[in-house]
Image (cartoon, helix red, strand yellow):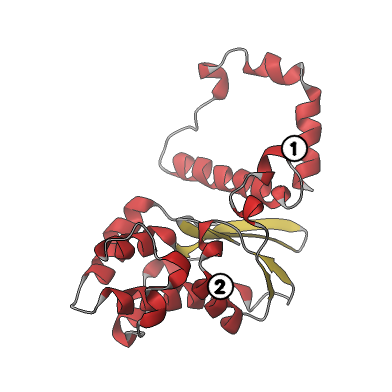
Amino acid sequence: LNLGGIANISFEQAGKRIAFDICPVNIALNFLASLAGRKYDNNGSIASKGFITPPLLKKLNQLNYYQKNPPKSLSREWIESNFFPLINKGSDPVENKLRTVLEHIAVQIAAVLNPLPKGKLLITGGGAKNKFLVEILRTKSDCNVVVPEVEIIDFKEALNFDGETGPYVQYAVVRAKNIFRKLRESGEEPPNPMDSYPNFGEFLSENNEIWEIIYLAAR
């Protein structure tokens, strides 16, 4: 589970790698934190002082995106058009809005996780540093939640393809396929890297170890 600007998940089901976006995370949290004069809500300290606003929580959970089946993906444009207007309304203090959005995030993630077989959940991304968010997730999920070392959260370990990098490679492939699918559905053809980089094919053919590294990382 990657808790970046958007929460996205990657897991194996019936021999297939499934990956998709779940809900906004840091894009929404940082926006609200900025209203309190902060770049972000460190460890969820502001949110921890707030209370859940049920009407706002209900509206967020009723957004049409959550009714769609994967594969699916979110964009900043969709969040700014559909999510921001809801959290920007009303006179609730920022701490209540942050607390409500954290609850919404946890509810949506739990809705994805709980139907799956119980297992280990690796959390990465900037949101993994939000201790209050992780604490809420632990109360709503049956998974064994694991938050790795800061180096992995910051993706430094991804540079050498050690550890848990495989899911990131797999997620990137699935995400790219979804983007290409949407382009074709809109009547456009995905760009061909050979058009912009005519020597790209020659480079790959002369560097067979690249394919071996990608294969090993994605296993």
Give how far across and how far down residue 178 sits, in percent: 54, 47
Residue 160 position (above or below residue 122): above
Whether the residues at callouts 2 and 1 have beta carbons within 8 Å, the answer is no
Residue toward you, 8 or 48: 48
Element assignment for label 2: helix
Question: Which image quarter: residue 134?
Answer: bottom right
Give how far across and how far down residue 130 sits, in percent: 50, 67
Q: Residue drawn at (75%, 46%), measured in percent from left and top? A: 218
Give how far across and how far down residue 119 sits, in percent: 74, 73
Q: Residue drawn at (78%, 35%), measured in percent from left and top? A: 213
- Badge 2: how crowded within 10 Å, few (<14), some, or many (20+)? many
Disc on the earlier residue, 2 or 1: 2
Number of the label disc, if any, that sits on residue 214? 1
Question: Identity of the amino acid at label 2?
Answer: Val
Residue 118 position (above or below residue 6): below
Q: Which residue is mark 2?
A: 134
Residue toward you, 165 or 219: 165
Q: Residue drawn at (55%, 56%), measured in percent from left and top? A: 125
- Compared across the picture, whether 180 is left or right of 49 comes to right
- Compared across the picture, whether 11 is left or right of 35 comes to right
